[in-house]
Every structure is written in C-alpha cells, then in structure tokens.
Image: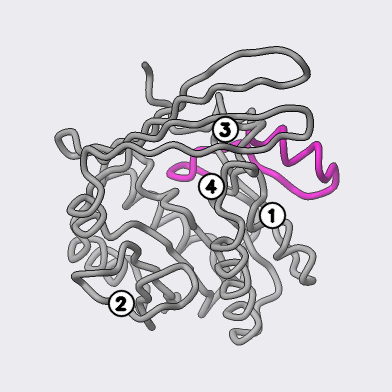
Amino acid sequence: MNINNDFSSSAKYYDIMQDNSRFRKSVKFVIKTLKEKKITSVLELGCGSGYYLFPIKNAGYNIEGLDIGKNILNEVKKKDKVVKLYLEDMSKFKIDKKFDSIICLNSSLVLLPDFTLMKKTLKKVHEHLNDSGLFMLDVPNHEVEIKESNNTQDSEKFKLKNGVMHVVYRDYKKENKWIAEEKCFVNENGKYFEFEEKFAELIFNPNKLEKELKKIGFNIEVMYGGRSGENFNKNRSRRRFYICKKS
C-alpha cells in the first residue's frame, strides 16, 4: 500500500471518523488563543476537511486553508464555495500576502517525509507571517505515544446517514516512522465496499525541532501537552502544542 498522507481514500468520511468531543475542546482552545493574541487573519496548513477552518471562520476570523490533498479540499468546497483554498505542498507554498497567524495542527507537519522538508515548511511559515505573528504548531510526543501504543489494534463503529462503517485501526513503529493503518468497511445506501488508509509520521527529535524554530526566528512562548492547553508532562503527554511568536 502506498503512503500518500493526503487522505485521498478517507476524504469523504474524515469528519465522521474524528473524536468530536476532543476536537471541540481543541477548537475552543485555538479560538481562545487567537482572540487573546488579537489575531485577524489566519492561514491553516494541512487544513484537511475544514475541521478547524470552519469553526474559526464562524468565530469571525478571516481564515484561508492549504492542503496537498485534492480530494480532501473538494470536501471543503462542498461545504463552502467562498473560502479561499490552496492546493499546495506546505514545504513549497508561496502566497502573495502575509497573515497574523499560521496554524499547523493534527500532526500535519510530521506527515512530511523528512526533517529537511519540515525545516523548509517552518521557513515558509516565518516568511508568510506579519511582524510578531503567531505560529501554532501541534505535533505528537512520539516517545510517549510509541511506548503506549506500539503494535496495538482497535476497532470502532460509525453510524452513517444511510448506513454504517466499521474501522479497524493498527499503530506501529517502522524504522523512523510511526505508522497508522485504517481498514474501513462500509455499508451505505444498500452497497458494501471497503478501503484502506495509511499514514506515516516522521519520528522527529523535539530538541532539534525547537532549536530549528529558534534558529529560523521564532520565540517559543509556551508548549502545552495537549490540543486543549493541558500542561506538558514528558512522561505522559502524547502531544506537543507550541505557541510561537515571530521575532
């Protein structure tokens, strides 16, 4: 199975497969932070199906989205034909404007295949931020995640409008990648089909990432241990949520 990291297979069902209660808390935290920092314009890298984009837009912010996945952006367009979208690689994008804030959430940065592309993305973020702009970066704390979930399997059932979907999840470490596999079995509108999705996160060195952020020109104001602003604990936190300011 090829690993494209572009949600091409699951785009239609992406929103359904998310943990709604957890993400609602995260969205509230992101909007609260934007409000506290007096942000007006936002660019979301790896915007996916608009899980963050639409609540932020509905909260009154001028937000645009960028993603490498054509299928997933088509899902956004079905919901909103007006919102500005960019079908771009986040490590190469060039937009003729700057933003008060750029956000990169849900591990989007580590879906890039190597650290060189991660660095290029961080430089692009810096270039596209206004002076003293805000960068919100959400990545895994792989040390804890792998310790707790390596070689595990789980399943979940999702109710569809006209059917049901069963998903089998499998997570495992392979060389320098953290792999998440999803096998989906769908019975919808009287038709049965199945599809697979596979994601590979680069297992990065957090110290190296933080040094690179500072080298490029970011001040790390705070790092949280979760998407909703939880305190960071090296031995328990499964996320690293950075709030950075362009210096």
Residue 85 appears in view: yes
Label 3: how many Cα within 10 Å (few below 14, some 14–19, many 20+): many
Q: Which residues are magenta?
A: 72-93
Quickly name the residue at label 4. 46
With 20 as the anchor, is 55 left or right in this view?
right
Q: Quadrant of residue 85?
A: top right
Question: In the displayed structure, would residue 197 be above or below residue 151?
Answer: above
Quickly name the residue at label 2. 232
Question: In the displayed structure, would residue 131 be above or below residue 112?
Answer: below
Amino acid type indicated by mark 1: Glu
Q: Position of residue 23 (x, y in %)?
A: 57, 61
The CA distance from mark 4 to mark 2 is 24 Å
Q: Secondary structure at mark 4?
A: loop
Quickly name the residue at label 1. 64
Quickly name the residue at label 3. 69
Tell me the mark number nearer the camera, choosing from 4 and 1. 4
- Residue at horizontal 31%, vertical 67%? 213
**Are the residues tagged 4 and 1 within 8 Å (C-beta)?**
no
Q: Secondary structure at mark 1?
A: strand
Q: Secondary structure at mark 3?
A: loop
Q: Position of residue 151 (x, y in %)?
A: 22, 38
